[in-house]
Image (tube, helix red, strand yellow):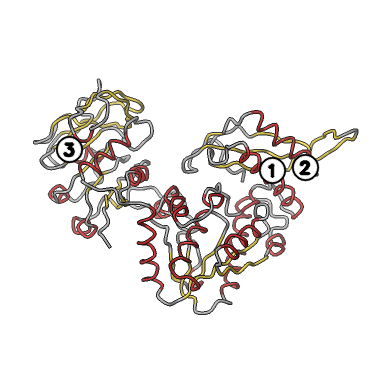
C-alpha cells in the first residue's frame, strides 16, 4: 500500500487542537495529534510531511512553559506555529516575545502578503480570530513578516528557506474567515501533500489492519443503535465476515421500535450474525425507585456489563471485543499531551472491566464523527442509519425525569417518535445536532372535549452543536412546534401539555439529566 501522507499536530494544550487536526483532514490529508514533548526520533518514525505546533494556555515566559525538541527545526520539514506555537518558535530560534500587557481576544483585520504561499488565493485584507496575551516583538534571523494588524506587527511570519511559518491568530476556528484555506495552503501547497485521505482509501487500510490483528479468532461487537457502533460493525463484517458476532441488548430504554429496526438492518438486510437480548424487565426492575441521574447511569452500566458478559459466553473462540471508539473519545479521555486537560472519562476508552478478558478492536479510533459518516456511506449504509442524531448511553432513563417505569417509557417513546417524524418531515433533522422529547415529573390541568384532565408534560429540546461540548437552542419555526404539540396531545394518551426548552449549553446541558 502507498505510504500515507501525514501531518503531526504537536499539542500544547489548546482548546482548539482537535480543530486543527480536523481542518487538516478536511483538506484530505491525514493528521494525528501527539504530545508536544515528542522526540525527533519518534517524529522520524511517523515520517510526516509537516508539523503544526498548536496554541496553548501557557506563556513562554513561565518557568515550566512547555517546549519542543529543538531538533525539529533541523528536520527539513515544513512547520506551522499557531499562537503559542509561533511564540515558542520565535523564542527558541533567537527572537523576542513580549508580554502584551492585556489579552487580545476576538476579531481582528489583517493585511497579508498574498504572494506568500500561506495566503495564496486569500484576500489581502481579511478577518481573523485572536486569542493571546504575548506577542512577537523581534523576529529571529532569517524571518520576515507576512501579515500584520493595526496592533500586532508580526501577525504572521515565515522563514521560507527553513520552511517555517507562524501565525498569531487561530486559522482553525470558523471565526477566521479564510482559515480553512490557509491550512489547506500549508498542507497541500507548502507540505506538498496530494490529498489522498478519503473514506474509500480508509476502508482498504482498515480492512487490512483488522485482518492482521484478528487472524482467525472471533470478535464480538456491542450494537447500540448509534452511528459509531453501527459503522464499526459493518466495517468489521466486511473485513472478517462470520468471525464477527454482534450483541444487541434491549434494555427497555430505547427509541421507538429500535430492536426491530436493528434486526431488519443487520440480520435480514446485511446478513450479519446478531444476538438479540431482551433484558427490558431486568433493567426496569433494577431501576425501580432510582431517581438520581448518576445512580441511574451506574445501575445501567453495571447491569449492561453483566448481561453482555453472559451473552458473550455463548459465542465460541472469542478473543476480541470491538468498540466504536472515535478519535475525540481517545483525546478527551487520555489527554494526548501532558499539557492537555482531561475533559471526561469516556465509556469506550478503558471503561470496560478488565475481567471481560478480551483484546480490543477499535477500527474507528483515529476518525472524527464526520469521517465516520463518510465511511458509513462508502460501506453502503442507509442515510437513516448514518445520520442518526446522538442518543444518550442510558437512553430514556435520563429523559424520563425522576423514577422510571415501563408506562412512562412507553409514553415518552411515542412522543419522541412524533418529534422525530415531524422534524424529518420539515427537513430539519440533518440541520440540527439533536431533537427529542423529555417526560417531566409534572402534571397539570387540561381540557379535552368537555372533560377535565390532569396529565403529564412533555418538554421539547432541539439544539445546534458541532461537538456536543457547547450548544445553542434551535429557533424552530412556530408551525413545526405547533404540529408537534398538536400530535403529541392528540395521539399520546396521558400527555396534555407540551413546552419548549429555550436554554443553551452552558448554562444548561443538552440532556436534562
Most distant residue in the right direction: 450
Task: Kindly state the secondary structure of the residue where label 2 is placed.
Answer: helix
Q: Which residue is mark 1?
A: 418
Q: Residue 492, which numbered label? A: none
- Position of 502 compared to 185: left or right? right
Task: Kindly state the secondary structure of the residue where label 1 is placed.
Answer: helix
Q: Nearer the viewer, residue 297 or 282?
A: 282
**N-term-proximal mark, 3 vs 2:** 3
Task: Name the image quarter holding the N terminus.
Answer: bottom left
What is the CA distance from the residue labelled 3 to the residue labelled 2? Answer: 66 Å
Residue 498 on image: x %, y %? 72, 36
Q: Nearer the viewer, residue 205 or 362?
A: 205
Residue 399 on image: x %, y %? 65, 47
Residue 151 on image: x %, y %? 25, 22
Residue 273 on image: x %, y %? 56, 70
Vertical relation: 98 (above or below) 277: above
Q: Which residue is mark 3?
A: 90
Q: Are marks 1 and 2 in contact (CB under 8 Å)?
A: yes
Count residues near mark 3 (Cα–Cα under 10 Å), then give few for <14, some for 14-19, many for 20+.
Answer: many
What is the CA distance from the residue labelled 1 to the residue labelled 3? Answer: 58 Å
What is the CA distance from the residue labelled 1 to the residue labelled 2? Answer: 9 Å
Amino acid at each position: 500500500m502507498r505510504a500515507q501522507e501525514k501531518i503531526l499536530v504537536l499539542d500544547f494544550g489548546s482548546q482548539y487542537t482537535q480543530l486543527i487536526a480536523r481542518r487538516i483532514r478536511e483538506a484530505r490529508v491525514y493528521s494525528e495529534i501527539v504530545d508536544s514533548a515528542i522526540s525527533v526520533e519518534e517524529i522520524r518514525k511517523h515520517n510526516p510531511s509537516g508539523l503544526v505546533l498548536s496554541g496553548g494556555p501557557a506563556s513562554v515566559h513561565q518557568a515550566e512553559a512547555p517546549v519542543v525538541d529543538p531538533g525539529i527545526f533541523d528536520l527539513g520539514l515544513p512547520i506551522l506555529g499557531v499562537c503559542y506555537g509561533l511564540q515558542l518558535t520565535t523564542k527558541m530560534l533567537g527572537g523576542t516575545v513580549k508580554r502584551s500587557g492585556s489579552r487580545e481576544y476576538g476579531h481582528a483585520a489583517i493585511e497579508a502578503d498574498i504572494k506568500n504561499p500561506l495566503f495564496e488565493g486569500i484576500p489581502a485584507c481579511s478577518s481573523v480570530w485572536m486569542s493571546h496575551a504575548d506577542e512577537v516583538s523581534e523576529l529571529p534571523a532569517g524571518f520576515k513578516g507576512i501579515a500584520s494588524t493595526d496592533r500586532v506587527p508580526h501577525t504572521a511570519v515565515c522563514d521560507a528557506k527553513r520552511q517555517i511559518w507562524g501565525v498569531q491568530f487561530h486559522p482553525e476556528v470558523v471565526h477566521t474567515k479564510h482559515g480553512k484555506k490557509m491550512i489547506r495552503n500549508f498542507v497541500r501547497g507548502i507540505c506538498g501533500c496530494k490529498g489522498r485521505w478519503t473514506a474509500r482509501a480508509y476502508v482498504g487500510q482498515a480492512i487490512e489492519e483488522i485482518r492482521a490483528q484478528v487472524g482467525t479468532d472471533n470478535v464480538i461487537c456491542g450494537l447500540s443503535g448509534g452511528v459509531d457502533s453501527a459503522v464499526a460493525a459493518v466495517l468489521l463484517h466486511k473485513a472478517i465476515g462470520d468471525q464477527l458476532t454482534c450483541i444487541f441488548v434491549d434494555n427497555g430504554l430505547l427509541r421507538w421500535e429500535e430492536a426491530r429496526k436493528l434486526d431488519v438492518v443487520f440480520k435480514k438486510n446485511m446478513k450479519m450474525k446478531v444476538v438479540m437480548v431482551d433484558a427490558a424487565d431486568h433493567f426496569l426492575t433494577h431501576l425501580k425507585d432510582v431517581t438520581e441521574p448518576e445512580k441511574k447511569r451506574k445501575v445501567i452500566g453495571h447491569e449492561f456489563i453483566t448481561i453482555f458478559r453472559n451473552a458473550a459466553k455463548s459465542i465460541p473462540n472469542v478473543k476480541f471485543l470491538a468498540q466504536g471508539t472515535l478519535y475525540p473519545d481517545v483525546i478527551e479521555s487520555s489527554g494526548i499531551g501532558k499539557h492537555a486537560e482531561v475533559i471526561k472519562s469516556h465509556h469506550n476508552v478503558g471503561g470496560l472491566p478488565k475481567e471481560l478478558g478480551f483484546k480490543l478492536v477499535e477500527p474507528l479510533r483515529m476518525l472524527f464523527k464526520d469521517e465516520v459518516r463518510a465511511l458509513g456511506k462508502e460501506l453502503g449504509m442507509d442515510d437513516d442509519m448514518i445520520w442518526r442524531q446522538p442518543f444518550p448511553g442510558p437512553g430514556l432513563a435520563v429523559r424520563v425525569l425522576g423514577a422510571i417505569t415501563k408506562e412512562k417509557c412507553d409514553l415518552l417513546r411515542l412522543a419522541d417518535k412524533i418529534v422525530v417524524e415531524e422534524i424529518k418531515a420539515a427537513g430539519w433533522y440533518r440541520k440540527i445536532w439533536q431533537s427529542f422529547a423529555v417526560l417531566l415529573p409534572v402534571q397539570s390541568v387540561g381540557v379535552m372535549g368537555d372533560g377535565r384532565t390532569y396529565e403529564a408534560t412533555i418538554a421539547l429540546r432541539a439544539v445546534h452543536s458541532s461537538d456536543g461540548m457547547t450548544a445553542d437552542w434551535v429557533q424552530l419555526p412556530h408551525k413545526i412546534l405547533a404540529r408537534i404539540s398538536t400530535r403529541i396531545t392528540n395521539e399520546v394518551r396521558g400527555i396534555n401539555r407540551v413546552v419548549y426548552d429555550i436554554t443553551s449549553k452552558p448554562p444548561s446541558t443538552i440532556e436534562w439529566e
